[in-house]
Image (spheres, grey):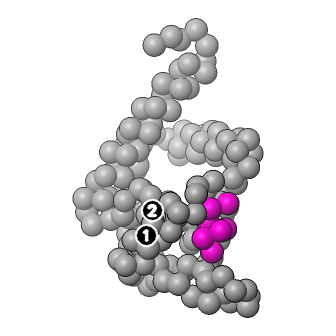
Amino acid sequence: MSTDKPTHLVEYEAMLLGRHSHLVASGAARAGGLERSAYILLSRIRADGPMTIRRLSEAFGLDPSTLNRQTAALTRAGLLERIPDPDGGLARKFQITVEGDRRLHAHREEIIRGLERVMADWSAGEVAAFAACLKRFNTDIERLTGHPWPRP
């Protein structure tokens, strides 16, 4: 690994973060949680409200056929349901079911508990600074890709 430039270190640490994030989340999945793609998809619908396949495709930058497969699996699992467009449009939308909302909340809480274990010795200021850097990093990626993520 070259460390000539700080971006080389960021690349390496981002790779490890992806690996470690997967390991923290896999503990949640083993506890009856969600797969990564389901967690992200349900989180987006939770943030935006009911969405069509077209809107999901635009939001994620994914092919509609990929999202059709994912939403079909989540619908079969009882985590999503198709509803008529509340605004009167022709396309049906997907919304989270009560069970989907429960599982999303439980999965998120399990991930948060894992992060709290990892950062147990960090000060509140260190956690806040890390969160701010991650937010800036993510929003800059979103700006460049044109796929912003809604934030509270």
Side of 20 relative to 136 (left or right): left
What SS does tag 2 mark?
Answer: helix
Residue drawn at x 44%, y 73% is 72
Where does label 1 land, which residue?
104
Q: For the residue carrying disc 2, how many other residues have a C-alpha within 10 Å: few (<14), some (14-19), or many (20+)?
A: some
Q: For the residue carrying disc 1, how many other residues have a C-alpha within 10 Å: few (<14), some (14-19), or many (20+)?
A: many
Side of 145 relative to 14 (left or right): right
- Asked whether residue 136 appears in the rendered view, the answer is no
Residue 18 location (% of width, % of height): 44, 39
Say which of 118 and 97 sits in front: 97
Say which of 17 and 54 sits in front: 54
Q: Amino acid at mark 1?
A: Leu
Q: Quadrant of residue 53?
A: bottom right
Asked if the residue at tag 2 contacts the one at tag 1, i.e. Cβ–Cβ closer than 8 Å, the answer is: yes
Residue at the farthest left position: 30
Is residue 136 shown above or below 4? below
- Asked whether residue 10 appears in the rendered view, the answer is yes
Residue drawn at x 53%, y 43% is 127
Q: Main SS of the magenta segment?
A: helix
Q: Is residue 146 magenta?
A: no
Residue 115 location (% of width, % of height): 41, 49
